[in-house]
Amino acid sequence: MKRTPTIALMGIMLLALVSIAVAAFVAWQQISEMKTSATAESAGFTAAVKIGGPFSLTNHLGEKVSDSTYRDQFMFVYFGYGYCPDVCPTELANMAAALDVLGEKAEAVRPVFITVDPERDSVEFLAEYVTQFHDRFVGLTGTLPEIASVAKSYRVFYRKATEPGSTEYLMDHSSFVYLMGPDGQFLTMFRGATNPESIAKTIGAYIEKRKAGA
Ligand code: NI
């Protein structure tokens, strides 16, 4: 009478231990895979879906621009919004730090911030905002349909997150930094919080490759 519940209990405990170990192993494998195959993964992503394309927007100086305005330069593209409390400023500072690591080579790169909140991110607002991060930065805004169109071509998700009873809102948005080539083609993308040295190294390699005529 006494032994049966004990054995059953031990069995349950053993099963629990095994499942914890399996879960930990799977999680560890996923994390290490994520770290090692970030580039391979984005390369696979390129083959599967097209990222980027033609757009028509307004820059932070109030000028009409399009994707072809930035042809012949590498383009760093990030979607976010000026009122973002943490993620966007961190990413923009990260991009700026990568440009600093690149030094003179940064002249080949045009960092572009495209707002997903054009209702608040006016030309004047963007002019003050983007230049705080780096003097090479371009801020782009547009009409709601223009923004929706460019976000769609970059597979960017965004939506207003409104608190009930408040007129203020946040924007939920995906946070990737895209690297586009001088021909406007997608090259690779960086996840949020990729360190600037690693970003600079990847871009530096593309710049060298282009110089070599490859
Ligand atoms: Ni943000």
Image (spheres, rainbow, N blue to C red):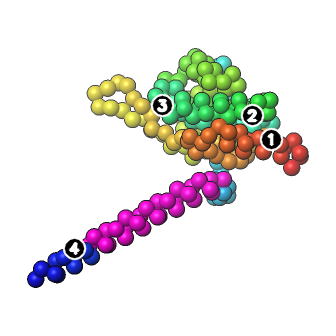
Mark 3 beta carbon near ligand 1 (under 8 Å): yes
State the count of labels.
4
Q: Secondary structure at mark 4?
A: helix
User: Which numbered disc flags the more N-terminal residue, 2 or 4?
Assistant: 4
Q: Are marks 4 and 1 in contact (CB under 8 Å)?
A: no
Judged left or right of residue 115, residue 21 is left
Residue 9: assigned label: 4
Residue at mark 3: 86
Mark 4 beta carbon near ligand 1 (under 8 Å): no
Amino acid type at mark 2 = Leu
Q: Give the magenta range.
A: 12-39
Residue 102: assigned label: 2
Q: Position of residue 165 (x, y in %)?
A: 28, 27
Q: Secondary structure at mark 1?
A: helix
For the stretch drawn in magenta, what is the main secondary structure? Answer: helix
Mark 2 beta carbon near ligand 1 (under 8 Å): no
Query: Alpha-carbon distance for marks 1 and 2?
Result: 10 Å
